[in-house]
Amino acid sequence: MPAVQKIAPGRLYIGGQWVDALAGGTFPTINPATEETLTRAAEGRAEDIDRAAVAARKAFEEGPWAKLSGSDRGRILWKIGDLLEARVAEVAEIETLDSGKTITESLRVDVPMAADCFRYFAGWASKIEGETVPVRAPFFNYTLREPLGVVGQIIPWNFPILLAAWKVAPALAAGNTIVLKPAEQTPLSALRLAQIAEEAGLPPGVLNVVTGFGPTAGGALVDHPGVDKIAFTGSTSVGQEIMRRASGTLKRLTLELGGKSPNIVFADADLDAAVRGAGNAIFYNKGEVCTAGSRLFVEDALHDTFLDKLSAFTAKLQQGDPLDPKTRLGPQVSEAQMARVLSFVDKGKGEGARLVLGGERAPGKGYFVRPTIFDGVRNDMTIAREEIFGPVLSVLRFREIDEVVRLANDTPYGLAAAVWTKDIKKAHRAARLLRAGTVWINTYGLYDSAMPFGGYKMSGFGRELGHHGLMEYTQTKSVWVDLS
Ligand code: ADP
């Protein structure tokens, strides 16, 4: 059976049941490589979010979930990881069809890392500890680390299964229950994850998946008084809107938002490694990466050589059918996203940047944008300031470290940054000075379930993954005992 047909089409997953949206609506999900409809997803609205939040509350307060020990929760999480791994080919196919990312990335990165994330947090489930606090006699005080309750999780379309895992796994490890709202462009892998979680023994109501649109389904989740926290990954403007709306019910928030990450190459860098690194930093997942190295700063002395080599590297990237294992660049996720990327290309040309490569849609079906490099970019141009979320690189020059750090930090964002140099002092000095939640030295785009990931400045707050990520799904209770 083709992978997509294994998903209950047009249904929501609420309280362990596959149900129609109450209003009965559905919407198509499109394969961006062919522009054809893959299947239809249910259009969840406020009343469906309400049903899901009620089911999640019931599971949190009354269901078997609340009574499970940490190690039993861990056992289920581990099983989800194992099942994801066992189904890697099928889940990867769904992901590639729905999002346009290459099958190689889905198979080798997204699905295995999602499985790893479940196993990583499976280990934590039995290790969430409180403290004993040395208060004045004759009292004894200790703390309990408790789950928050019902958490609403809103994820984007660029890494659907992986970012679902980043959010679902720690929330479950800490004992919360969940309403998950995948992006309308890529609803399928979250539904498949719900099936897998059920198969792994996750009790009904613990993970609910409501597909639907941002302002309606997502907005209702943010407003719902029965939801204790919103964990969101997406654009900064939607993050701001969520922050405003969440104040009504004073929800806890973690926001992982946009970026305009600087990738800095000093003249003493390992040239070939830096060229590959710079190319992958912007063209991986067709540039639809929140940490994309979209501003490439090259030291003056190296600039011309570097640009030649980077152009040669980029020209060799095979663009086309994302199901072909040789393909390196798939289509943008949607027609709207393609149009947005191309509008930034126009702005780049209009503001005087020099187009070195690409800059246009590829002919034929599918939302393919040619990998694009602009040289002669100034940091105040639109293409150096706004997040494009596509395969468009801005190249800028610099002379020395203080200048480049100042330029690199001159952005409202602070998600990630990288430096390439053989000089260990320069590398660590830059790592300290760069205002970003992640800094890579002589590499780019590394992640691990154990690392804390998140933003500085307008790239958001709160951390995902690692012990930090787990703590974001807990709250501390102080307990006093009179020992007199
Ligand atoms: P993009 O603009 O790149 O599509 P968004 O930030 O709009 O990214 O979307 C990320 C996620 O946020 C998606 O699941 C989307 O449905 C959801 N979303 C969009 N608008 C809102 C909103 N007003 N309230 C809650 N969720 C939203």
Image (spheres, rainbow, N blue to C red):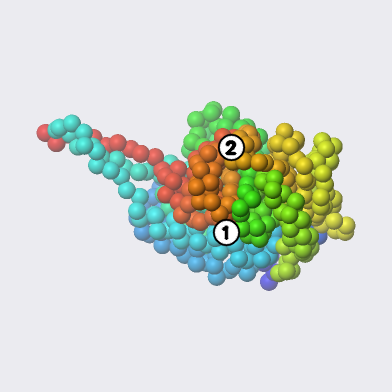
Q: Read off the residue under disc 2.
A: 402
- Percent position of residue 256, x then y: 57, 42
Q: Earlier in the sequence, mark 2 or mark 1?
A: 1
Q: Secondary structure at mark 1?
A: helix
Number of marks in the rendered image? 2
Image position, residue 320 (x, y; %): 79, 63
Say which of 431 and 116 sits in front.
431
Q: Please state the horizontal and vertical placement of residue 388, each as a whole percent of the image.
A: 72, 43
Residue 370 versus residue 478 in the image, above or below: below
Kindly report which numbered mark, 2 or 1, lies closer to the viewer in this rendering.
2
Q: Position of residue 392 (x, y in %)?
A: 75, 48
Type of the residue with mark 2: Asp
Quarter of the image with the N terminus in it = bottom right
What number is the disc on residue 271? Answer: none
Of all residues shown, which one is farthest toward the right? 363
Residue at left offset 33%, top offset 38%: 477
Looking at the image, which residue is at 53% across and 48% down?
427
Q: Which residue is mark 1?
A: 193
